[in-house]
Amino acid sequence: MSGTGQAKTFDAAAARQRCLKFRRRILDVSQQVTALHIGGAFSCLEIVDVIYNGLMRRENGKSSDTFLMSKGHGCLAQYVTLESLGILTREDLDAYCTPGGKLGVHPDYGVPGIEASTGSLGHGLPMAVGMAYAEKIKGTGGRVYTVLSDGEVQEGSTWEAVLMASSLGVTNLVAFIDYNDFQSLGRTSETHPTFYPLTDKFQSFGWDTAEINGHDAGALHQAAVSGSGKKPMMVVCRTVKGRGVSYMENVPIWHYRAPNKDEYAKAIAELREVSS
């Protein structure tokens, strides 16, 4: 999406520090609930951070762009980012998945900063295409960003949206795939080997594409702004489920589990060592 007025520079070092802080915050929240989608949140943190802090435009605290978390189970990455921006409060996040709290295990429309209810996988990209097309018709210049899981790319509705996006010419749409190669508790590459090569499929459907390290904030930002401006943009992000905590990385049980006190202490210690 070059030529759309986006900033050409991005402070990747600051992004790394934010994401370390976000991981620690999610770990703190994990001690208040019996389970949460920690592995998938950790795999997409850098993606979400780059969208909010490197791509979306804001004036007077309000964004002219839209973000949709299609991968609804990764919403903790969005919640901690919204908290850091002052859109959600500390009290909101502390009450995550508790009686009377406003934040659930998937994003709900009506919560500050949440543009659509997601979590039923395969619905987010179709909604994002519709939103982008509406912005294009209205001539607002608004852009739409969305994050998908690689598992939900198996949904037929996702591919209908991929086809429709290029057919409608929604050049104001940038989608990111959190390509952590896990579908709940199994490797996507093992259960669906013909799913690959993934990037080539989007190219054949009329998208600009890039495939990068999804934990490299600088590469993420550069990929998102590198499109031709004539097609929708798909950024395939190679990520690690549970990224940042050694005993969580690529271990299926951390799809939906909260660490006990000893595991929490070990994770916090690892993240502090990285940040020092």
Image (cartoon, rainbow, N blue to C red):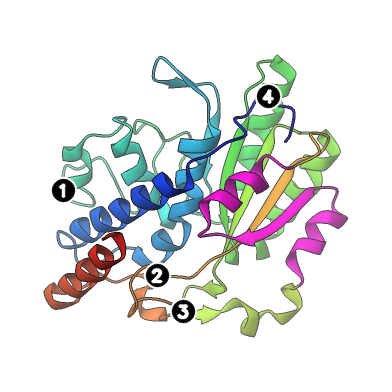
Q: Is residue 187 above or below residue 237?
A: below
Callouts 1 and 3 close, C-beta under 8 Å = no
Residue at 47% x, 33% y is 115
Residue 161 horizontal side relative to residue 272, left or right? right
Q: Where is residue 237 shown, x and y percent of the image? A: 60, 60
The Cα–Cα distance between marks 2 and 3, rounded to whole angstroms, is 13 Å
Give whichever of discs 1 and 4 has the lower sequence position. Answer: 1
Quarter in which the N terminus is drawn: top right
Give whichever of discs 2 and 3 has the lower sequence position. Answer: 3
The Cα–Cα distance between marks 3 and 4, rounded to whole angstroms, is 37 Å
Q: Quadrant of residue 156?
A: bottom right
Q: Quadrant of residue 165?
A: top right
Give whichever of discs 2 and 4 has the lower sequence position. Answer: 4
The Cα–Cα distance between marks 2 and 4, rounded to whole angstroms, is 36 Å
Q: Count neighbours of disc 3 (C-alpha within 10 A) and say few if under 14, some if 14 to 19, many if 20 or more.
A: few
Mark closer to the observer (1, 3): 3
Q: Where is residue 255 shown, x and y percent of the image? A: 39, 71
Mark 4 = which residue?
Answer: 134
Mark 2 = which residue?
Answer: 242
Callouts 3 and 4 close, C-beta under 8 Å = no
Q: Is residue 17 magenta?
A: no
Where are the magenta residues, as a range? 197-226
Mark 3 = which residue?
Answer: 185
Q: Amino acid at mark 2?
A: Gly
Mark closer to the observer (2, 4): 2
Q: Amino acid at mark 4?
A: Ala
Mark 1 = which residue?
Answer: 99
Callouts 2 and 3 close, C-beta under 8 Å = no
Q: Amino acid at mark 3?
A: Leu
Mark closer to the observer (2, 1): 2
